Amino acid sequence: MNTNTPRVFIAATRQNDGKTTASLGLIAALQETFPRIGYIKPVGQRFVEIEEQKIDEDTILMDAVYRLNCPLVDMSPIAVEPDFTRKYLQTANNDALIKKIQKAFDRVSWEKDFVLCEGSGHAGVGSVFDLSNARVAKLLEAKVIIVSQGGIGKPIDEIALNQALFEKEGVEIIGVILNKVIGEKVDYITDFARRGLKRKGLELLGVLPYQRILCNPSVELIREDLKAEVLNPAAKLETLVGDVVVGAMSAQNAIKFFSPGTLLITPGDREDIVLAACASLEMRGGPRMAGIVLTGGIRPGDNILKIIRSIEAPFMLVKDDSYEVASKVNNLIVKTRPADSEKISVIRDIVAKNVNVKRIVESL
């Protein structure tokens, strides 16, 4: 396996702590030092099928944003399907999996100046099939950056647990990035987290301030999760949703919630609210709501559908009731997508401004 190309492994203390955010921003920042960067997510858990190959979602994102000129199948060599663990425990084909990862890394790193390796959770994820993040980092001979959510006590406790497993595998930790820190607490958290990490022999590489936009799902992401039918062909699904309102009041009272970025959830037979939303959206200079979800599987009448079809804000129909829809939207895991250009720009900016990239380069 290639041992010459510089590389770093991005891990986290838990799922959705910001590995992909850090990876996305670091590739842009590191390109100033390493013009040709490769990317690999050795073990992926969320994937889509492309040309009969299971490719991790984060791999698709990185390739779409940076055009890395690497085969997708090599950037995402192992996809953990629902029955992956059961099959592994029956056959225990660890050597084959290791060779697959190492060969994929060789192809990804070919003629590259640097390779960013993204993990799939905390240090122990994958242990059940003998490919924990700590083990994979060791196999790739990569130094590690740990990403954790903002704070002092809880993050450092969790970082210490991860540190123990990486050190058991003989993997060096370059440092830590704290993510989603409330703006007014950045200086305070930076000061005390640095002190706490130093006592563990770890360096604080950066603190990323919380950006609400990065937690806002697009209408398209919500549509996919709800398996909703879009009723108007001119709908713009890339709009980000900032607030969610359940329309269970009178139309007159609902109007005050028709604000930019709002997703309105209301039963399909509440024609008064639907017509009020249509009127608001048709009004020049009026608030541009992100979209409307009609629940209960109740399709509006033909006269109302005719109005809906002329509006750009998406109207979506689902079978679930309003409470179920609101719960699903609230619990939705928000992932950055290739089409989220505004989010990607924000990510590049906050990583460049708040992470000590120079220190990362020096450590390699």
Image (cartoon, rainbow, N blue to C red):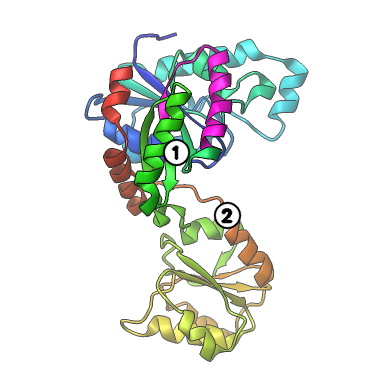
Q: Nearer the viewer, residue 126 or 122?
A: 122
Residue 170's place in the image compared with 38, above or below, is above
Tell me the element at label 1. Answer: helix
Q: Which residues are magenta?
A: 155-178
Q: Position of residue 99 (x, y in %)?
A: 55, 12
Occupied quadrant, residue 40: top left
* Residue at (47% x, 77% y) in the render: 309
Q: Amino acid at mark 1?
A: Thr
Residue hosting label 2:
332
- Number of numbered callouts drawn: 2
Q: Position of residue 21 (x, y in %)?
A: 41, 41
- For the C terminus, the quadrant is top left
* Residue at (32% x, 24% y) in the render: 360
- For the N terminus, the quadrant is top left
Q: Earlier in the sequence, mark 2 or mark 1?
A: 1
Q: Position of residue 155 (x, y in %)?
A: 52, 37
Residue 229's place in the image compared with 84, above or below, is below
* Residue 347: numbered disc: none
Instruction: Tell me, yes or no, whether the highlighted magenta stretch contains residue 167.
Output: yes
Q: Nearer the viewer, residue 200 or 182?
A: 200
Occupied quadrant, residue 144: top left
Crowd class of label 2 (few under 14; some 14 to 19; many from 20; radius 10 Å): some
Q: Nearer the viewer, residue 237 or 161?
A: 161
Q: Position of residue 260 (x, y in %)?
A: 40, 72
* Residue at (39% x, 83% y) in the render: 282
Distance (Cα) linking label 2 and label 1: 17 Å
Is residue 145 at all visible to an observer of this figure?
Answer: no
Tell me the element at label 2. Answer: loop
Residue hosting label 1:
20
Instruction: Tell me, yes or no, whether the highlighted magenta stretch contains residue 236.
Output: no
